[in-house]
Amino acid sequence: MLPEDPYERRAVRLGRVVASLRTAQLRAAWLREALRAMPVEDAAEVLERVCHAADTQADPNAEALVHALAEILADPALDPAREALRGEARARKLLTLERMLRRPYVRKPGAPKRVVEQLEDDSGVALEADREPTPRDVPDYGKGRPLTLGERKSLARRPPPELLPRVLSDPHPDVIRMVLASPRLTEEHVISLCVKRPGRAEVLHEVARHPRWCHRPRVRVALVQNPATPPEVAIALVALLRAQELRSVIETHALHPSVRAAAAERLERRPPVRKRPAEGIQ
């Protein structure tokens, strides 16, 4: 029996449809079109109920929908839609959705350091995530000369095994986008890219939005754990983490305090693990 709340009914139906689709790519594509067909006010109310069910009830259909939502919101082309949903969530006090769409705070020069209780930022590490790449950052492909961007992208489509580590070290997001679609790439390769320090925000953003890799649990954890991952992307991915993964994020002081705070709130709201009843001795 469907609930009386019309937004709750739509949330249940959306979750059922998304969970019934066989691939992550289909789920994300279908959800994108379903949300486009809704007024932003309705979409925010429906997604609040979905996120709440995933957060507090561990509902598998809701969790499948939240996975698809995290993927499509990692697409920079949807930044205006993300901002519209965030505005509705704040105006309507849709706290669970707002938590997933939260914009990390940025301390202004000269302003006192903001401390999140028990989550102070003590990294003190200057990251290179936002530094513009220079020709010296491009790896040596062993051709005796620097390769053009077009040549590097062509090489990334089907990289020879011996050149794959060099392609994965390329700082240009277009090259990374090409290599992420290569059939020769394995999960271990992607994880090695995600754990690289210092990381590059644009490169990690490409991994977070790629339908083949963004749903892999180990890849997802590696993205959240990298301080160079854009905080807004990491905060959305926190909604997909399990309890032990959340604890690991909270304990990683090099991460942005907003990411760690989101992990702490998510851990506090997660339902207790249901223990399976002990079977009787036959």
Image (tube, rainbow, N blue to C red):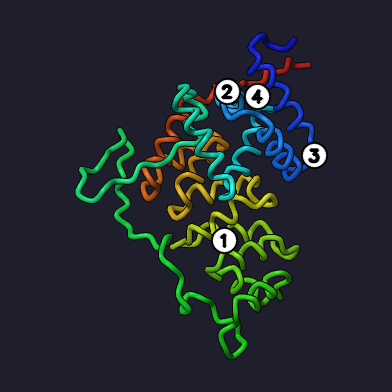
The residue depicted at 29 percent of the width and 54 percent of the height is 124
- Please give the residue where the numbered disc 3 appears in the rendered image: 22
Above-or-below relation of 264 to 253: above
Assess whether mark 4 and mark 1 are in contact (beta carbons under 8 angstroms). no
- Please give the residue where the numbered disc 2 appears in the rendered image: 45
User: Which element type, helix, strand or loop, lies under badge 1?
Assistant: helix
Q: Quadrant of residue 8?
A: top right
Inspect the image, locate mark 4, and give the three-letter code of the amino acid beneath it: Asp
- Whichever of callouts 3 and 4 sits on the residue coming sooner in the sequence is 3
Assess whether mark 1 and mark 2 are in contact (beta carbons under 8 angstroms). no
The residue depicted at 73 percent of the width and 32 percent of the height is 18
- Whichever of callouts 2 and 1 sits on the residue coming sooner in the sequence is 2
**Left or right: 111 in relation to 12:** left
Mark 1 vs mark 4: give the one in front.
4
Q: Is residue 244 visible?
A: no
Mark 4: give few (<14), some (14-19) or many (20+) Cα within 10 Å: some
3D distance between C-alphas at marks 3 and 2: 26 Å
Assess whether mark 4 and mark 3 are in contact (beta carbons under 8 angstroms). no
3D distance between C-alphas at marks 3 and 4: 18 Å
Mark 2: give few (<14), some (14-19) or many (20+) Cα within 10 Å: many
- Please give the residue where the numbered disc 4 appears in the rendered image: 59
3D distance between C-alphas at marks 2 and 1: 38 Å
- Whichever of callouts 4 and 2 sits on the residue coming sooner in the sequence is 2
Above-or-below relation of 93 to 241: above
The spot of residue 23 in percent (x, y) is 77, 43
Mark 3: give few (<14), some (14-19) or many (20+) Cα within 10 Å: few
- Whichever of callouts 3 and 1 sits on the residue coming sooner in the sequence is 3
The spot of residue 222 in percent (x, y) is 54, 51
The spot of residue 16 in percent (x, y) is 75, 26
